[in-house]
Amino acid sequence: KAGVTQTPRYLIKTRGQQVTLSCSPISGHRSVSWYQQTPGQGLQFLFEYFSETQRNKGNFPGRFSGRQFSNSRSEMNVSTLELGDSALYLCASRESTEAFFGQGTRLTVV
Amino acid sequence: AQKVTQAQTEISVVEKEDVTLDCVYETRDTTYYLFWYKQPPSGELVFLIRRNSFDEQNEISGRYSWNFQKSTSSFNFTITASQVVDSAVYFCALSENSNSGYALNFGKGTSLLVTP
């Protein structure tokens, strides 16, 4: 099976802009989760989608949103970007309890 | 609230040495899952092992072994005969059994450097 695919791998945006990140899960996996990784805060859970419904949400502002499509692919959107949003954004897909991660999208906000 | 503590920030060993990575967790749930992930420089988190809260049997898988002790809330991970390719950041994570999903709560990570 192909692994979790995240696009793009790298992204540079300007403060105030918005960005959309994409994640294609492992075939057959219906759960997709998103995590933010920064040097200061470490790995933090953003949200999880299952069968197109958000099932769980971490402690992030409303600027962070996501959605999942019928083919289980997921997108994450960050609006009104701030410098502090610079991070590695990791997507994970899951069939049971083990989560398998993609290589991430490294977002730099300037 | 859940909490995962990895007290070791960085560890440096010489190839072929054994190395143990420590993990201590806090949770009020009786059913939970513990994980170890490896993050090489490429950035991808690689799943290594999972342990259920109701199964304290310790196992060995190749050069990896783990020691899960509920009495001390610890889930330590050992690499035997370390190799240079083991150099990475290792994360311990905790997930509760929840109808609202399996959000992973990660520790801060331990950076392991294995030198020839």
Image (spheres, coloured by chain):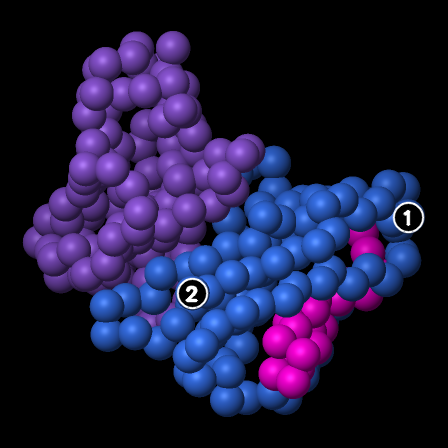
Chain colours: A purple, B blue
Evaluate whether residue B27 shows in this view.
Answer: yes
Real-space Cα distance between discs 2 and 1? 38 Å
| Rendered residue at 49%/81% (across/down) | B52
Q: Which mark is residue A43?
A: none
Chain containing the residue with disc 2 = B
Q: Nearer the viewer, mark 2 or mark 1?
A: 2
Picture residue at 65% right of the left edge, 85% below the top: B71
Estimate the x, y position of residue A8 in percent, counting from the top left: 32, 28
Q: Quadrant of residue A12?
A: top left
Is residue A9 something one can see in this rendering? Answer: no
Amino acid found under the numbered disc labelled 1: Val
Residue at the outermost left position? A70
Q: Is residue B94 above or below residue A19?
A: below
- Quarter residue B37 falls in: bottom right
Query: Which residue is disc 2 drawn over?
Result: B1
In this rendering, position of residue B4 left or right of residue A53: right
Tell me the magenta residue range.
Answer: B65-84
Q: Position of residue A36 (x, y in %)?
A: 40, 40
Residue position marked by numbered label 1 in the rendering = B14
User: Horizontal placement of B60 versus A70: left or right?
Assistant: right
